[in-house]
Image (cartoon, rainbow, N blue to C red):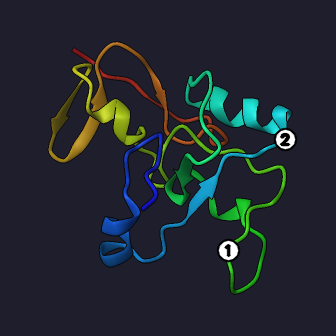
Amino acid sequence: MHKCIVCGNKSNTTKVNRPGVIYHGIPKNAYMRRKWLKVFGIDRCHDWQRICSDHFLEENYKPGKKRFLFSNAIPQPYDQNGFPSNDATQSNDIEIENNVILPIEQNMPVRPYLRIWITMFR
């Protein structure tokens, strides 16, 4: 069983509920490994740990039947729907209203490349 170190997705659960989820190994290349971990504020990890496909954009994958990442693919701090990774949703710094996750004390980019920001107004 694999578990995503970012959001906690588990392969034995997603295999049934969401069969398209893939668990990618952390790169062995030291430079790329640091880039991947820096996105999530993680200092170090083990070789056996994984990051699930929820944290990669569709354009990060090579075309073809099997889903392989391009060698320069970097995971996103948000899932593919623009929401913060699951670990952020478990903290006390958010509130849920009408099924939308709203940040309380910080701005959050919806998609970094779109330059759209959501701000919580009190």
Q: Residue 44's image quarter? A: top right
Find disc 1 in the rendering and name its residue: 67
Q: Which comes sooner in the sequence, label 1 or label 2?
A: 2
- How packed mark 1 is, by other alpha carbons closer than 10 Å (few <14, some 14-19, many 20 or more), is some
- Of all residues, the one furthest to the bottom in this rendering is 65
Q: In the rendered image of this protein, does residue 82 appear above or below residue 87? A: below
Q: In the rendered image of this protein, does residue 35 appear above or below residue 51? A: above
**What type is the residue that disc 2 sits on?**
Asn
Q: How many angstroms separate mark 1 from mark 2 (CA)?
A: 20 Å
Q: Residue 98's image quarter? A: top left
Q: Residue at x 78, y 71 (%)?
A: 62
Q: Quadrant of the C terminus?
A: top left
**What type is the residue that disc 1 sits on?**
Arg
Q: Residue at x 68, y 37 (%)?
A: 36
Name the residue nearer the viewer: 99 or 46.
46
Q: Quadrant of the N terminus?
A: bottom left
Which marked residue is nearer to the observer: mark 1 or mark 2?
2
Q: Residue at x 79, y 44 (%)?
A: 28
Find disc 2 in the rendering and name its residue: 29
Name the residue nearer the viewer: 54 or 24.
24
| Contact between labelled residues 2 and 1, with CB atoms less than 8 Å apart | no
Is residue 1 toward the left or the right of residue 49 in the image?
left
Circle 1: element type: loop
Pinpoint residue 35: horizontal percent, then vertical percent: 74, 32
Circle 2: element type: loop
Q: Residue at x 27, y 37 (%)?
A: 101
Name the residue nearer the viewer: 43 or 91.
43
Q: How many marks?
A: 2
